[in-house]
Image (cartoon, grey):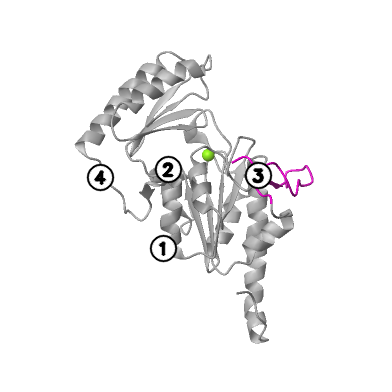
Amino acid sequence: MGAPATGYKGAGDVAMVEAINITDTCHSRTQLVEALATQNVLLVAIDFDGTISGFSDNPASAVLEPGAREALRIFSELTNTHVVVISGRTVSDLTHKFPALDKVRLIGSHGHEYDSGQNSTLTQAQIDELSSAHEILSRATAKWSGTSVERKSYAVAFHFRSAVPKPLESELQPIRAALSKLGNGIVRDGSMVIEYCAFRTSKGDALQRLRSELYPSKVLMMGDDRTDEDAFRALAPSGISIKVGGAETEALFRVRDVAAAVTLLQDIAARRREWMGMLPALSRIGKSIRP
Ligand SMILES: [Mg+2]
């Protein structure tokens, strides 16, 4: 991890894409867009918060960045193109964020909850663990104003983005330690959130499952959070992983913020639509399109 920065540094505007963990090649933004847009079967997997939606003090009020909806719609309506949102949110929550985008697949709970309904039932032990986690995290909310506890399908989350004062790391560590003793679940750190999840499924697991189901010739995964690193690792070495924001990452590329992420998605979607529109004509004149 952490190979020295190399390659294309971009133009310094919102369109910048930086190659960060690549040492053997130099990718330009144009090359990256072209390589993704011209795949026989493309899988586009995207995190929600901090990737195609800005953060909000209230998670419920987070909305899609302008342009993201149209990019996802284009992907979703093209043949041989799959677009999936993989988030820590519940599928029910995500569904409200994507009205009228029926062909965008939604996977919630960090890869555990599928919109296809292939989900798990909690055991009594897991229900008890989540109740205990709720108690621990509710006690934490009493210490800081502006914090909240969210009960999800398979997890309980402590949100402290709006905390006053901000919790110190030394104050958060005992909370994580208490949660880690609850059972067989997993404690996850997100962006200003700590979660106890009853299942250990990761976004990487979800991507592997999608790969075995869809057989994409290339996978793009874009995300900003620590939980997206599981997906980045799952994609190596053949997938394209893109980190949103400046945090340390194992992704191959980085864009600086949500606006840059959405701009890149728009460009890939537009180019793929254009390229796929050319395919029938190319086939008629007998040209080899791409292996
Ligand atoms: Mg995120």
Q: Which residue does the numbered mark 4 point to in the structure image?
A: 121
Cα separation between marks 4 and 1: 22 Å
Q: Mark 1: which amino acid?
A: Glu
User: Hey, what amino acid is under mark 3?
Assistant: Arg
Mark 4 crowdedness (10 Å alpha carbons): few <14, some 14-19, many ≥20: few
Query: Would you call the spot at circle 1 few (<14 residues within 10 Å), some (14-19), or many (20 or more)?
Result: few
- Real-space Cα separation, disc 2 to disc 1, in angstroms: 18 Å
The mark lying in front, picked from 4 and 3, is 3
Please give the residue where the numbered disc 2 appears in the rendered image. 110
Q: Are marks 2 and 1 in contact (CB under 8 Å)?
A: no
Q: Nearer the viewer, mark 4 or mark 1?
A: 1
112 lies above or below 131: below
Report the residue at 73% width, 43% height from top: 14
Q: Is residue 147 magenta?
A: no
Question: In whole angstroms, how far apart are the C-alphas of marks 4 and 3?
Answer: 37 Å
Label 4 close to label 3 by CB (< 8 Å): no
Mark 2 vs mark 3: in front: 3
Q: Work out whether 3 lies above or below 27.
A: above
Q: Residue at x 47, y 35 (%)?
A: 60
Q: Is residue 2 above or below residue 156?
A: below
Q: Amino acid at mark 4?
A: Thr
Q: Residue furthest bottom?
A: 285
Towards the viewer: 237 or 260? 237
The magenta span reads: 1-23
Where disc 3 sits, the SS reads strand
Q: Earlier in the sequence, mark 4 or mark 3?
A: 4
Alpha carbon of mark 1 to alpha carbon of mark 3: how far?
28 Å
User: Are the residues flagged by discs 1 and 3 in contact, CB closer than 8 Å?
Assistant: no
Q: Residue 200 versus residue 99: which sits nearer the camera?
A: 200
CA distance for labels 4 and 2: 16 Å
The numbered mark, 2 or 3, whose residue comes first in the sequence reads: 2
Residue underneath mark 1 = 213
